Image (cartoon, rainbow, N blue to C red):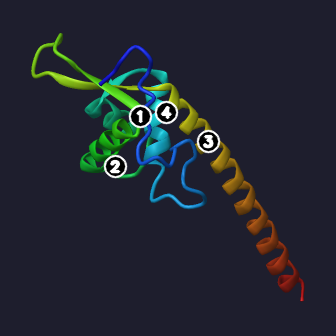
Amino acid sequence: MCDGDGGHARSGGHGRCCPPPGRSRSFLQPWLLLLLSRDAAHGYELLERLGQLDVVPGADPGLLYRTLRQFEEDGLVCSAWDTDGSGPARRVYRITDEGLEYLHAWAVNVRRTRQRLDRFLDEYEKRFREEEKK
């Protein structure tokens, strides 16, 4: 749940300040955190925003909600029930300070990955440009 200090709980004792290096099944995690850094939202809103941005093709609602639950367990987001609107109550998610740190770490990781990919593409182009000249 959301509390006044932003919910800094850590899970598993291994500190979640850095995303896993190199590989990610998708960019769902950093995109969710980036969207939540702009404004609190409920799951369906986040799913709509991801669809509008077309950044996580075919985002699965089940995966989105599992990710949000895991984020909450890890202290990256907190949530509270919104009962003000018409219709059923909805859980609204907010990013925590630890979630912002994790998002910043993702950006560093993406930059490093982009540099490695650029280096690969440069070498690839050199290799096959030389072959085309022969």
Q: Nearer the viewer, mark 4 or mark 1?
A: 1
Whichever of labels 3 and 4 marks the residue nearer the N terminus, that label is 4
> For mark 2, what is the residue?
59
Task: Decide which of tag 3 and tag 1 comes sooner along the chain.
Answer: 1
Residue 15 placement (x, y as % from top left): 52, 44
Counting other residues with Cα less than 10 Å from the Cα at mark 3, is it few (<14), some (14-19), or many (20 or more)? some
Measure the alpha-carbon separation of dots 3 and 4: 10 Å
Question: Quadrant of residue 51 in the image?
Answer: top left
**Distance CA(mark 3)–CA(mark 2):** 23 Å
The numbered mark at residue 75 is 1
Q: Which quadrant of the view contains residue 4?
A: top left
Circle 2 crowding by C-alpha within 10 Å: few under 14, some 14–19, many from 20:
some
Amino acid type of the residue that numbered disc 1 sits on in the rendered structure = Gly
Q: Do the residues labelled 4 and 1 touch (CB within 8 Å)?
A: yes
- Relative image position of residue 44 (x, y in whole percent): 26, 33
Residue lying at the far left in this picture: please name it. 87
The quadrant in which the N terminus is found is: top left
The residue under label 3 is 105
Which amino acid does the dot numbered 3 rest on?
Ala
Mark nearer the viewer, 3 or 1: 1
Circle 4 residue: 99
Q: Position of residue 130 (x, y in %)?
A: 88, 81
* Badge 3 element: helix
Mark 1 Cα shell of 10 Å, populated few (<14), some (14-19), many (≥20): many
Q: Which of marks 4 and 1 is nearer the N terminus?
A: 1
Three-letter code, disc 4 = Gly
Sequence-wise, the earlier of marks 2 and 1 is 2
Mark 4 surroundings within 10 Å by alpha-carbon count, few (fewer than 14), some (14 through 19), many (20 or more): many
